[in-house]
Image (cartoon, rainbow, N blue to C red):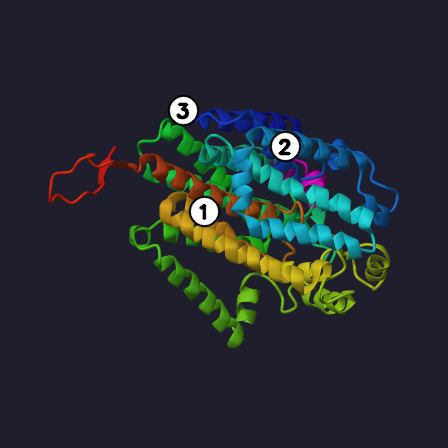
Amino acid sequence: MSPSLATCIYIVAIFGLFCLNRDKSEHTSRALWIPVIWFFLTGSRPVSVWLGIAPPSSAIAQQMDGTPADRLVFTILIIFGLAILVRRGQRVLSVLANNWAILLYFFYCLLSVVWSDFPDVSIKRWIKATGDVVMALIVVTDGQPIAALRRLFSRVGFLLMPLSILFIKYYPYLGRLFNPWTGAPENTGVAMNKNMLGVTTLVLGLGTLWQVSLLWKKSDQPNRFRRLAAQCILLGLVIWVLFNAHSATSGACFVFGGGLMLATRSTKIRRRPAAVHVLVLGVLLIGGLAVLTGGDSGVIHAMGRNSNLTGRTEIWQRVIPMAPNAVVGAGFESFWLGPRLEKLWHSGYAFAINEAHDGYIEVYLELGWVGVGLIALILTHGYRRSIAAFRVDPSSGSLMLAYVLATPLYNITEAGFRMLDPAWSFLLLAIISASRILALAKEKENVTKPDAIPVEPAPWPAIGQQTTSVLVRR
């Protein structure tokens, strides 16, 4: 099949998926398209790459300044997003107040600009990083937040997954690259590299699996059959892309997160939410025993990795001693800049590295032990919120748990706690969504709970009669 014909067929197929998934019973805001565009770009390629705009002359300059086109588009999206949030006022403030751990982390990141060697670059990146929170707030403060969440997964997935397959199969010069370590060809799809394709597929795959499980069990959903067909097709595309991306970390996290989600949907666990703690503890114990007994090397080889995790351990040994300050780090998004970057790029690596390939080490380099502690605080806060959301809404809470628990696992071999990384973006979205679920449940409880109104006693009680207030239910 010629690429032109394949392109036409894929465009029709994408349109068909949108038609199959339409549901007129749900009414979400048109503002939802703002986060859809945001996550489409962060999960694929920058605007400058899509438009074929030439990057700065040197790689160092590109790392420092980026491109004006990308900066303009992200700025416009953030400004539009903030305008939407201002109109939603009290709802936004309520959600932010319930996510103090995230606010504390971002405040510390802003504070770290003070000791950064490149404060101008750091502050610009901090502003861009807040876009992830803005987009999450647009989704969860929608009039129908769960419906908005479903449409976000569907819209982004219907665009990115078919396009990735199209690029891989019919436009190899766009959808494939050669591994800088081994020289072997790799599938990148619409992303910039296979790991980015893997994590994008991971986060969209969990959302798609969640929707399939919802439609499978709830037979009273409107237009259930065709919506289920659309989601099953998307899930098939996700599995194909994930398998062909050959991203071992993303594949393992998808199996872990998806398995956890399906396990928590079982009737026994839904009746006893405390059993979720036991399930999570069991997974952690198995992982810990594997490390203590040396079984982790067997797991690594089974995932298709060598003992040095495809060169990751060499990077860790090189960059950890380069941290300028163990307590507070180099400053937000400031480590991979300037002389340190030049030194690493001229130290004999086969390609120009710009991340630690470990989320915790990455945060340590940028924000020190304080930053690592704040990430741990966010994960703890997110876990507690997700458990609480699971108690009031097991269907949605299971998805939040999957993200909150799969993201820390992903960050063991990938730097996922970074701005605009899909793993980080959807972790924030999951935690904020869990808080919104709890708020809605509380509002519903207050509306349905009858108020007690005291009725004053008679002004002249009978002799010997005790004067009391009577509570009348209304």
- Magenta span: 164-176
**Separation of disc 3 and disc 2 at Cα?**
25 Å
Residue annotated with mark 2: 81
The residue that mark 3 highlights is 25
Q: Residues within 10 Å of mark 2 (few under 14, many from 20)?
A: many
Nearest the eye: 182 or 116: 116
Q: Is residue 32 left or right of residue 355?
A: left
Which element is circle 1 on? helix
Q: Could you tell me the amino acid type at mark 3?
A: Ser
Contact between labelled residues 2 and 1, with CB atoms less than 8 Å apart: no
At mark 2, the secondary structure is helix
Instruction: Name which of mark 3 and mark 1 comes first in the sequence.
Output: 3
Residue drawn at x 25%, y 32% as measured from the top left: 474
55 within the magenta span? no
Observer able to see residue 376: yes
In the picture provided, is 340 more to the left or to the right than 231? right
- Residue found at x 76% / y 33%: 72
Residue 2 position, x and y percent, is: 64, 29
* Up-down relation of residue 392 to residue 249 (above or below): above
Label 1 sits on residue: 399
Is the C-beta separation of discs 3 and 2 under 8 Å?
A: no
What type is the residue that disc 2 sits on?
Answer: Gly
Q: Earlier in the sequence, mark 3 or mark 2?
A: 3
Q: Residue at coordinates 60% horizontally, 25% vertically from top-left?
A: 8
